[in-house]
Amino acid sequence: MKEPPTAAPPDVGPDARTDASVIERSWHDPEWFGVIFDAYFAEIHGYVARRLDPQAADDIASETFHAAFRQRKRFDLSRGSARPWLYGIATNLIAKHRRSEARKFRALGRLSGERSADGHEDRVVTRVSAQHMKGRLARVVGDLPADQRDVLLLVVLAGLSYEEAAQALDVPYGTVASRFSRARQKLRRALGGVDPMVDQEGPTDG
């Protein structure tokens, strides 16, 4: 991929309102897709690294943007933001590593007592303070069905709204809400009734 143009118009950048216009322009001038790469690569890489590991993130993040570049003419310009679209591509690529991801979360559960409190699993268990609860939670996340784990981590780790997660996964809004609810119930049961999402009743859209 070529480097993006050195001089971009004032309305170009990572702002969600301008992604669609940048991608549309890249249809005819591919260099412009570099603006999307610069705006989101680090974020997508970080998300994949938290779900898998940094080495896998190098490959998957790069593949995400190669795939996005190839598919850019199929991007729905009415959505404006490229962020959910990119997370959706990354999630599809992560699906090839389901077993590795599940093993990682289970290992985090076993090793939680030996880890410091700044591990990435703390993002999932922000409101739970006991280390043994963190370990149990990580194991449950690893045991979740793949579709529920995708929704949970897109919302909690990536910070997507339900609407954005629905766009990323190409499923209805209600499906995202249902999967998140079921995942949350399983986490709550694993923690003996403690709700790890307390004070986080779900993201607001808009």
Image (cartoon, rainbow, N blue to C red):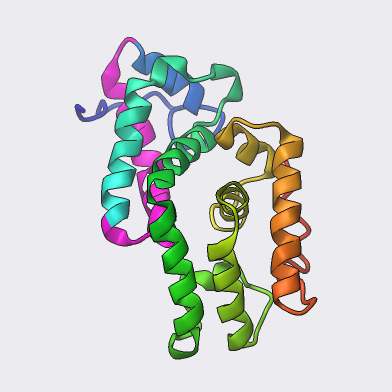
Residue 12 visible in image:
yes
Q: Position of residue 69 (x, y in %)?
A: 33, 25
Residue 119 visible in image:
no
Rendered residue at 53%/64% (across/down) = 142
Extreme residue toward the left, this view: 2
Q: Position of residue 55 (x, y in %)?
A: 26, 58
In the image, 164 versus 174, the foreground residue is 174
Rendered residue at 72%/61% (across/down) = 184
Q: Quadrant of residue 66?
A: top left
Give yes or no for residue 31 being in the magenta stretch.
yes
In the drawing, does residue 46 fall left or right of residue 1? Answer: right
Rendered residue at 59%/30% (across/down) = 170
- The tally of labels here is 0
Q: Position of residue 79 (x, y in %)?
A: 59, 24
Q: Which residues are magenta?
A: 28-55
In the rendered image of this protein, does residue 138 appear above or below residue 91? below
Give yes or no for residue 25 being in the magenta stretch.
no
Q: Position of residue 67 (x, y in %)?
A: 34, 29
In the drawing, does residue 150 fall left or right of residue 110? Answer: right
Q: Quadrant of residue 166?
A: top right
Main SS, magenta residues:
helix
In the image, 24 versus 67, the foreground residue is 67
The quarter of the picture where the C terminus appears is top right
The quarter of the picture where the N terminus appears is top left
In the rendered image of this protein, does residue 55 appear above or below residue 92? below
Extreme residue toward the top, this view: 28
